[in-house]
Image (cartoon, grey):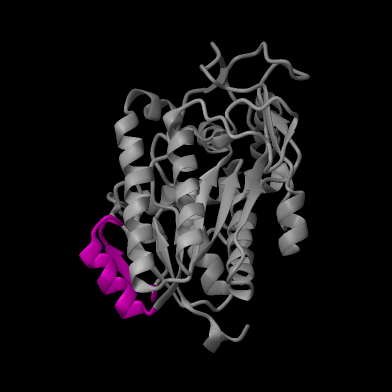
Amino acid sequence: MTLHSKPSVLVTGGAGYIGSHAVLALKDAGWPVAVIDNLSTGFRFAIPDGVPFYDGDIEDAVLLTRIFSEQATGAIMHFAGSIIVPESVTDPLKYYHNNTAKSRALIAGAVTAGVRHFIFSSTAAVYGIPAVAAVDENTPQRPINPYGWSKLMTERMLADVATAHPINYGVLRYFNVAGADPQARGGQSTAGATHLIKVGVEAALGLREAVSVFGTDYATADGTGVRDYIHVSDLAAAHVLTLEALIANPSHSLTMNCGYGRGFSVNEVLDAVDRVTNRQLVRRLEPRRAGDPDSLIADSRHLRGTLGWEPAHADLDTIIAHALGWERKLADLRRSDGDTSS
């Protein structure tokens, strides 16, 4: 696919963690790209120089129409939304608004504008607590919280819309996303983030007193929960490959799990943080959190077989080293600019 044949891609939530890495991957591959983000949780500095940026909301139909026209948008990568599972339980309407109703507005705008390809940032939370060790795309989808339901509802909308209109879609169900751009161009920047590797690295740098370990009596080798951690840059690469596949076969849509098919326990991750940072983290043992499965590991054969995707950073120490590099750069950014949110 030549540069001139590549349609412009609108990245929603492109100032956020995963969205900003997708922007980097698209730019690196020569795709024209623009970003819409309301900066409620994203950061303006995360958007590379030269990328058109629209400060606004995806349910603003007038703004969307203008963006689609100005950018000649041919594809959308949709990352905008709310992602904190416990918050979804205490404030479900926020999640059904931000993740489902706003997605409906975005999809409607795309259909009206004739956008042909749509990639959606979904989650392993759609599986709830699966009864199998390795989760494939046919594992029953039984969310146990509003976050998972809000994402599954959007998946259903996309399937129905693709049946009724000339648009195809790629649904990517993420497992545990971690790490940062290997060149330290971006990373997880949210204050108070709950991602384990982010929390561990912050603690190693003295930004947190301790790391909480929620539950030590799971049915795993060391009693702590096991998760499949995928490097954010490998995930971003999967989005670009998905876009290429959707364009190559406009009558076909895809739903794929994004993970490595290998799990690490909480203690194994924290041991790796100790190893990479040459620190000894303080671990605070806490009760289990409601709804946390013992183990959640992706069967990613569909992703690998369909797209030819091969991860470049599938090593836990590498993921942590990249997260550490970004955390140090982020500290420098915050020292030089007291407000990095603008």
> Measured from the top left, where is residue 3 in percent x and y?
56, 85
Q: Is residue 222 left or right of residue 2?
A: right
Report which quarter residue 259 is drawn in.
Answer: top right
Residue drawn at x 67%, y 21% is: 294
> Measured from the top left, where is residue 226 in percent x and y?
69, 28
Q: Is residue 303 left or right of residue 332?
A: right
Residue 50's place in the image compared with 133, above or below, is below
Residue 185 seen from this side: no
Report which quarter residue 97 is drawn in.
Answer: top left
Q: Quadrant of the C terminus?
A: bottom left
**Residue at the outermost front position:** 164
Residue drawn at x 34%, y 23% is: 90
Residue drawn at x 36%, y 78% is: 71
Which span of residues is magenta-colored? 50-72
> Measured from the top left, where is residue 240 in percent x and y?
59, 66
> Measured from the top left, where is residue 8 in percent x and y?
45, 76
Report which quarter residue 37 is drawn in.
Answer: bottom left
Q: Nearer the viewer, residue 314 or 88?
A: 88
Residue drawn at x 27%, y 50% is: 339
